[in-house]
Image: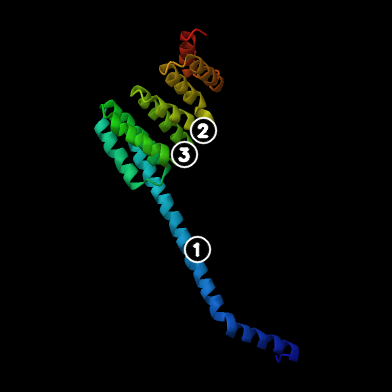
């Protein structure tokens, strides 16, 4: 069917626009599909990494905790191969526990430091900070231990961090400040938290 004059003008305008900008449109479409493909591939890779890390982590947590050598070997592999997943931070804490049990305090501190800086989960970061603070307290590095306790900002771990703070302050001879820290810890612990009893005993030992 023949086009009228107005329709023909519109067709001619479209042809002219396509001739002028068609290559840009084509390149843009190609770029879009390339980026989309890369995004899909990255998502697939991330999911695969997470699944593999999860499987390896599960194989670690079922091990007897006395099997420290295998725990350390497997957790190190998880950290090396899947450092971008949440399981790496958890593995670092398990490595630290096994290393500490073997008397490797320095390696334990190293892994806890790594977890506190690289953990993908706030809870894992908090656990690492508290455990690292406890080791530093043992080493009588009170200022460093106190800093680790103060760095905890996850609400679920403020009871433990304040309990640690009380231990450090008590070791420093700052009894009044230690009492306040223990009292704050008790406020943070839930009514059924089993750890609250130990904090209460430490508070009473200070004469409260």
Graded by Cα atoms within 10 Å as few (under 14), some (14 to 19) or many (20 or more), the crowding at tag 3 reads some
Q: Tell me whether the residue at label 3 lies in contact with that at label 1, contact meaning CB atoms closer than 8 angstroms.
A: no
Q: Please tell me which of labels 3 and 1 falls first in the chain.
A: 1
Front residue of this view, candidates 138 and 67: 138
* Residue labelled with disc 3: 121
Quarter of the figure with residue 138: top left
Q: CA distance from mark 1 to mark 2?
A: 37 Å
Q: Please tell me which of labels 2 and 3 falls first in the chain.
A: 3
Q: Vertically, is 33 above or below 148?
A: below
Front residue of this view, candidates 104 and 12: 104
Q: Vertically, is 131 above or below 199?
A: below
* Residue labelled with disc 1: 36
Residue furthest toward the top?
207
Whole-percent x, y for residue 179 in the image: 51, 15
Q: Please tell me which of labels 1 and 2 falls first in the chain.
A: 1
Q: Residue at x 55, y 23 (%)?
A: 188
Colour scheme: rainbow
Can the viewer see residue 23 in this picture? yes
Mark 3: secondary structure: loop
* Residue labelled with disc 2: 153
Graded by Cα atoms within 10 Å as few (under 14), some (14 to 19) or many (20 or more), the crowding at tag 2 reads some
Mark 1: secondary structure: helix
**Horizontal relation, residue 79 to residue 180: left or right:** left
Q: Residue at x 46, y 17 (%)?
A: 174
Q: CA distance from mark 2 to mark 3?
A: 12 Å
């Amino acid at each position: 069917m023949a086009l009228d004059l107005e329709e023909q003008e519109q067709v001619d305008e479209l042809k002219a626009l396509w001739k002028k900008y068609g290559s840009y449109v084509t390149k843009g479409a190609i770029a879009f599909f390339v980026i989309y493909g890369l995004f899909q591939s990255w998502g697939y890779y991330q999911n695969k990494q997470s699944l593999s890390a999860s499987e390896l982590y599960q194989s670690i947590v079922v091990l007897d905790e006395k099997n420290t050598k295998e725990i350390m070997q497997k957790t190190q592999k998880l950290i090396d191969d899947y450092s971008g997943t949440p399981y790496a931070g958890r593995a670092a804490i398990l490595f630290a526990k096994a290393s500490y049990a073997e008397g490797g305090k320095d390696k334990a501190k190293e892994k806890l430091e790594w977890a506190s800086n690289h953990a993908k989960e706030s809870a894992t970061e908090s656990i690492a900070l508290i455990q690292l603070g406890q080791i530093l307290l043992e080493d009588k590095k009170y200022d460093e231990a106190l800093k680790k306790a103060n760095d905890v900002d996850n609400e679920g771990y403020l009871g433990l961090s304040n309990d640690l703070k009380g231990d450090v302050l008590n070791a420093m001879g700052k009894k009044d400040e230690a009492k306040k820290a223990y009292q704050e810890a008790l406020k943070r612990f839930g009514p059924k938290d089993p750890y609250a009893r130990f904090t209460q005993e430490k508070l009473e030992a200070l004469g409260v």
